[in-house]
Image (tube, rainbow, N blue to C red):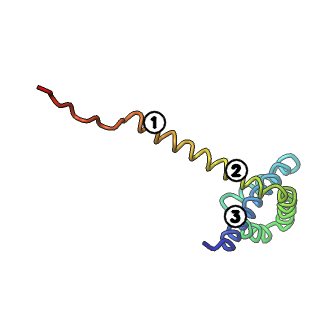
Amino acid sequence: MDLKQIAKETAKTLQSYLTYQALRTVLAQLGETNPPLAHWLQNFSAGKVQDGEAYIEELFLEKSDLALRIMTVREHIAAEMVEFLPEMVLTGIQQANMEQRRQHLERITQLNLSDPSPKAPKTDNI
């Protein structure tokens, strides 16, 4: 298990997710101030935000001002959440693992209660 590689891949996934969240924020803002541009950005972005960096690169070629705006919002979101994210992730995983274990224990306990072991066959004493 290469923890450094896992961390790099996790960071890249988080970057792409923050790009998506920044896009949502910008779309909401544009929806109030410039609906035609919001519509254009929505159409342009459809299916492209899976890789946040490739999306930003492509957006720069079309509308660099929107790319810069999304990057600024993304950076702001990251700066605001970086302080408590590690604790939230660890706590979330611990709680989810505990819930999964609890559900598994309930399932195997119910299975054992509903399907008791076969009893020893009766013998006739004559």
Q: Nearer the viewer, mark 1 or mark 3?
A: 1
Asked if labels 3 and 1 touch by Cβ distance under 8 angstroms, the answer is no
Element type at marker 1? helix
- In the picture of the structure, the residue carrying the numbered disc 2 is 92
Element type at marker 3? helix
> Where residue 117 sits: x, y (%)?
33, 38
Foreground of the two, 50 or 108: 108
108 left or right of 20 in image:
left
Q: Nearer the viewer, mark 3 or mark 2?
A: 2
Q: Amino acid at mark 1?
A: Gln
- In the picture of the structure, the residue carrying the numbered disc 3 is 13
- In the picture of the structure, the residue carrying the numbered disc 1 is 110
Q: Quadrant of the N terminus?
A: bottom right
Q: CA distance from mark 3 to mark 2?
A: 18 Å
Q: Amino acid at mark 2?
A: Gly
Element type at marker 2? helix
